[in-house]
Image: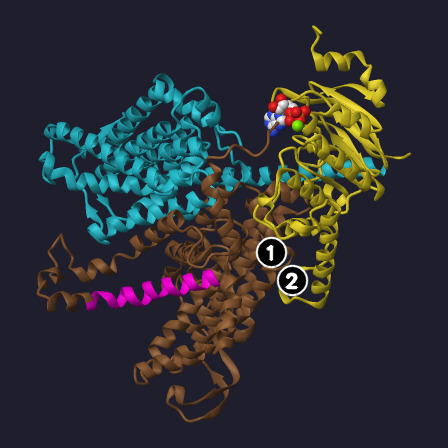
Chain colours: A yellow, B brown, C cyan
Amino acid sequence: MPAILRVEGLSKRFGGLVAVDNVSFEVNEGEVFALIGPNGAGKTTLFNCVTGFYAPTFGSINFGGRDISGSPPHRTAKAGIARTFQNIRLFDYMSAVDNVRLGHHCRMHSKLWDSLFKTPFEKREEKAIIEHSMELLELVGLGRHADSYARNLAYGQQRRLEIARALATSPKLLLLDEPAAGFTPQEKVELMQLVQVILGRGITVFLIEHDMRVVMQASKRIVVLDHGEKIAEGTPAEVRSNQRVIEAYLGKSA
Amino acid sequence: MSRVRTWFQDNRRNPNAIAYSVFIIAALLYPTIVQFWTGGNGDYLVGIAADGGIYMLMAIGLNVVVGFAGLLDLGYAAFFAIGSYTYAEVASYHLGVTPVDHALHIPFWLALFVGMFIAASAGALLGAPTLRLRGDYLAIVTLGFGEIVPIVFRNGGIWTGGVPGISGLDVPTLPGWFQGPWINQNFAWVPDFRFTTANLTAYYVLMVLLIGMTVVLVHNLYNSRLGRAWMAVREDETAAAASGVNTVTVKLLAFSIGAATSGFAGAFYGAKLSYVSSENFSFIVSVTVLAMVVLGGMGNIPGAMLGAAVLYFILFWLLPSAPSQVESLASSVGLDFLNKAVPNGWPGIAEEISRSKYVIFGLILVGIMLLRPQGLLPSQIRKQELKHEEHEALTVPRQLQS
Amino acid sequence: MAETVQRLRGTFFTLNVNSLLNLAGGIAVLVAIIATLQRVFESGGTYFFQTLGFGLAQGAIFALVALGYTMVYGIIELINFAHGDVFTLGAFFSLAMMPLFGLNPSSSGAGVILPLLGLFVITMLFCALVNITIERVAYRPLRHAPRLAPLITAIGMSSLLEGVMFIWRGPFNLAYPDFLPEQQLSLGGGITIAAKAVFVIILALILMVGLTFFINRSKLGKAMRATAQDRDAAQLMGININRTISATFFIGAALAGAGGIIYGLYYNSVAAFDGFAYGLYAFTAAVFGGIGNVPGAALGGFMIGVIAAMSDGYFTVAWTRPLIFGILIFVLVFRPTGLLGMRVPEK
Ligand SMILES: Nc1ncnc2c1ncn2[C@@H]1O[C@H](COP(=O)(O)OP(=O)(O)O)[C@@H](O)[C@H]1O
Ligand SMILES: [Mg+2]
């Protein structure tokens, strides 16, 4: 399988702090790939580098054969990388459906002119976008909440709405930052089903997750970070038996 | 009757529809009512309303910048000045007395758009490097720009007419116009019509049409992909960027569209006065327009219009006429001493009232933000935002942060 | 291969734009300095030192006002637009309080020193109280609102203060008594400097050194620094945030009030709207030095004062304002951290 995302020698420093230290790995097309590691290991920072929120200090990020290191977030989104945030970031005072409609922004073709004069093209495009947004809301199980303000949704619904908004950008690669944090076991099962559906749409999933059971079950391959360094990579079974991983999670003394 | 009532009930959930209807009816009836009320001498009042329309245009434009995109522009009058001066350069004898030595007389309708275009370009030039900065820096940059521009026009020497400015600008023209009893004339079709101060109703009609056009266009923008992106950027720039919105471009568009509206209003202002001077574009103009938007309701087009109408009425009608009325009131109730100015002290009640403009601005800006931040006619989204805000400080973050 | 070329081109392009801008900026500064030097040599030393003295004196006042902007920005990241008007209020208030201290326009000599000291104390207190009231009324309720909200109330407060002074004393330039000695101090070699300017500079320096000591040594000063760095952490350490913020507004306004009196004494004239432009100059100084940075504000104040004086003295007064605001815009765009760097991290 060809690699869709190739991270090579990636480092990110904040002043003296090395948040990500010379990390390399590849995510293959059509798989679920997981990134794990203790709190503060640099997982979110790595996501931020991939999506262009941070420019890497060293190293390169290659997506679908193109070098995207240092591209701003809207470019990486347009290139086909979508993401969710560890601490949910929705447009709280826009309705659920408007959140998803906004997600289509970079795939829309209406120009300023079309918007100003409400041309037939613009009307047709808006109509199509609304239909597609409703479809995505159904997909994540929020069809009945299309008109609720995002902030009035329950926690789990907000997490799913964020996924719907990310899907609206028609990504090839979806980055999920701790999507199951704070979920009940039942919700986690539903989330994993949703991930399978997304995968079925031909979208590669790259996720950060703390719950080992979820990670082991859902993902094909795993990279483990600790203090910014990659300490292990492999299938769930390989990672589970890796001595350094056990140490990182349980402490050296254990 | 019952149909009317259901119409109102239907629209109760959307006050904007009612507001727009009221605006249209008021705009249509205003000249007639004024003429009737003053016994045919109301031209002056019609003219005031036309001037107020210039502020209304600016308020609609600033609302795009401040209300939709959440950018504080404190130099809005600069674009107004740029529009006016552009009109003055391209539609008067003036370039003929500069080293260019060739006067331009671009027709009014074209010149209006030239002014708009130049102002929008200035907005883009200023915005491109500064919109990357954090929001409050933008406020300062625009404030500085708003101070620089009028001074540059004042110091421009022969090019800008220096301190006295430029007079004798071309007045608006139309291929034809209807006249009638509303200006004490017989019904007639006037070909090659020139707008003059003898026919302020014509200005008024023109102003209403321009505002109507602007409202439709801005309304369309608000309900488009771009309007949604503005809202998103205002709410959460990071999330907007992650969703594929180029935040800098989107903000730049808001900023330039605001500047364009201001430049458009400025060009019209120059044409109507037939005169421009750097004195008319100081910081106080920017603050006036900002106060209008805040008073009416940030982010809502009819709100900005209402704010403009109310504040314009207070500042340019009530405040200038109040002093003499209060003076006569004071003397009629035997408080004559209030009217007498004391050297180096009490300047007389009339003078005190006419000085109160700045306090009114201050009270509106502070009072509205504290007591009714959604303004007189709030946008639905702002109302929601503000309803929740008060609880924000008390509640624990909804989820654990990393 | 093609990829590498593209990347190289990318780097080259960004390098190019940045270095070009730096180059253009550098050339502009260089040209300005050369043009100034040429005129300085043409006009002789006496004029130069007069101009420099004037520049440093007005710079000292800018610095006093800039400190308030920078301290408030450092702690709550708000541009307190009303600050420049609190400064003018200091001049207005002290003018009105003069009879209380037996001061009148004809007073002079050493007899004015003690009453003047009293005037300073009461004016600084008054301005401080006004400023903490403003913070309580107009800023504190909006601390969790969108950033736009307190900025707008700050503009409103500025307009309100100007309006109050305008209603109170009208649109006139008020004469401010001239208590300071008029003579020139000789620096040797036929070069003199106005005693007035020296007095202003020394007074401002005393106040600034006092402030620095306070911030570095006192408990409250430490609380202010801690709050500026990380409000949540400071709160966890048991620091009373509201009181610390009030203290910041208090000190900033006290310095501005003192600046108001010094302004009056130095220029002998004050008007209701002086604070607007003067406040913007001072804000420029704060940005120039690195907003949030206390020594930076002082340095920026003196530099802006001297630049403005040189522009007035050697070029035309009419272009000084555009020059200063142009500097403001350029610093914000190309070096938002200012000369000495921001102490506050981006949040
Ligand atoms: N913008 C930033 N500035 C400074 N330090 C940061 C920044 N973002 C993250 N860090 C630091 O980088 C390290 C890794 O953080 P993060 O990537 O969020 O960890 P994880 O997501 O694995 O829990 C932490 O020590 C964090 O404090
Ligand atoms: Mg994380």
Query: Which is more toward the observer, B229 or C212?
Result: B229
* Location of residue C324 by image quarter: top left
User: How many labels were placed on the picture?
Assistant: 2
Residue B227 badge: 1
| Distance (Cα) linking label 1 and label 2 | 9 Å
Mark 1 CB near ligand 1 (8 Å cut): no
Q: Position of residue A113 (x, y in %)?
A: 66, 63
Amino acid of disc 2: Ser
Amino acid of disc 1: Gly
**Residue B315 appears in the figure:** yes
Contact flag, marks 1 and 2 (Cβ < 8 Å)? yes
Ligand 2 visible in quadrant: top right
On the same chain, marks 1 and 2? The answer is no
Q: Is the magenta stretch mostly helix, strand or loop?
A: helix
Give the chain letter at badge 1. B
> Residue at position x 64%, y 67% from top?
A117
Give the chain letter at badge 2. A
Q: Position of residue B127 (x, y in %)?
A: 55, 49
Report the magenta residues as a range. B302-325
Question: Is residue A118 depicted above or below C273 in this figure?
Answer: below
Q: What SS does tag 2 mark?
A: helix
Residue carrying label 2: A115
Would residue C30 be found to the left or right of residue A234 on screen? left
